[in-house]
Amino acid sequence: MMSLQDRLSEAKGKIEGLISTKELEASVSLKESDFKSKEPWGWHDLNEREQQMLRNKWKTETLNERKVDTEIYSAAIIEYESILDKMDKEGLSLENINENIQKFTVLRGEGENAELQEYELELDEGMVILDCMHRIQYEQDPELAIRWNCKAGKCGSCSAEINGRPRLMCMTRMSDVIAETPQGQPIEVRPMKAFPHVKDLVTDVSYNYEVAKRIKPIKGPDDPNWEFNQHEAHRVQQFRECIECFLCVNTCHVLRDHQLFDDFAGPRNLVRLAQYEMHPLDTEDRIPEIKKEFGVEYCNITRCCTEVCPAGIQITDDAIIPLKERVVDRYYDPLQRIWRTITRQKVRY
């Protein structure tokens, strides 16, 4: 059974389907202004009831001019007003309905032609940002481009910037966003800034996969039955929880502000390198590449990548800083150099 709010919205939709309320009011206002200019004293001589009768007459004239069936329109108005009366008796007001209406501004378009477009939609309890984007697609703008898959925070596809903060749309509750948005302001949804814009909320994140191809894989024993202690496995386990949403890459100032894509691997791929380097059975030497090709030294450990990680991975403390320490040991520690000279250890630089 439909609620009174839903019935009211449906009745209003019937009226708007016949003629726009704004169009009708504008026409009546124009006729009223014309009457006042021709007969200024005549309008003031009319009482309130007579003035309203004139307005109703002008409404009927407008409906006939627009070829709207007056009987159907009158029936729709009566239905709308009867629902309002019922709501008034039950203590429901239009203000309570409007509390569920939320405005959004969403970036629409491609490249330099993209611009923010405003939408307004009714919210249901428990919605997340992705639900709202889907409702906009279904009810208002079917051409809105969004990348998504699981809607459970596991695929990392629906990354976006919500009110300027990189987040997963499927894991961002409307109740939280509304609480942080100034009253009367729309919620702003944009694509990730660091990557090339494709269309609407979709960006090209292929850079991350191209860098991943250049990373040397794990090199371990030929025997497939690898055995090592659980505490050794636990050290790298959190790195395997990465869902490749690339929010960390998007918020990294080295890439977002300075565009050093050719010189820096980005937080996600530094996590991949740490996962391989810290594997207890790995024997591959990647330190020169970590320093030169993947540019670990560009990171100045602001921890912004850690703050936005939806998987809770300690990217800075547990991945990037240990990689920096290994580079320092190889290239800058004088005691290490002396020890390697004494023991005649040969390493790559």
Image (cartoon, rainbow, N blue to C red):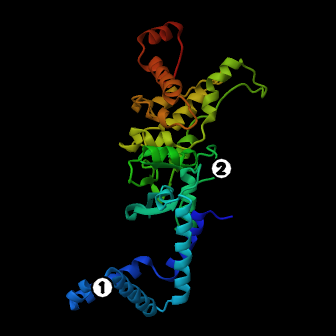
Considering the image in quadrants, where does the N terminus appear? Answer: bottom right
* Res 156 seen here: yes
Looking at the rendered structure, the kind of residue marked 1 is Glu
Tell me the residue that label 2 is attached to: 150
Gap between marks 2 and 1, in whole Å?
Answer: 56 Å
* Residue at image point 50% right, 89% down: 68
Residue in front for this viewpoint, 14 or 96? 96
* Residue at image point 43% right, 53% down: 188
Image spot of residue 192 (x, y percent)? 46, 49
Q: Secondary structure at mark 1?
A: helix
Looking at the rendered structure, the kind of residue marked 2 is Cys
Residue in front for this viewpoint, 243 or 345? 243
Crowd tier of the residue under label 1, counting other residues whose Cα lies within 10 Å: few below 14, some 14–19, many 20 or above: some
Q: Is residue 320 left or right of residue 115?
A: right
Image spot of residue 36 (x, y percent)? 24, 86
* Residue at image point 65% right, 23% down: 234
Which-is-in-front pick, marks 2 and 1? 1
Q: How many marks?
A: 2
Q: Is 35 above or below relative to 179?
A: below
Tell me the residue that label 1 is attached to: 32
Image spot of residue 149 (x, y percent)? 63, 52
Residue in front for this viewpoint, 323 or 329? 323
Q: Earlier in the sequence, mark 2 or mark 1?
A: 1
Crowd tier of the residue under label 2, counting other residues whose Cα lies within 10 Å: few below 14, some 14–19, many 20 or above: few
Q: Is 45 above or below relative to 247?
A: below
Q: Is 118 above or below relative to 275?
A: below
Q: Secondary structure at mark 2?
A: loop
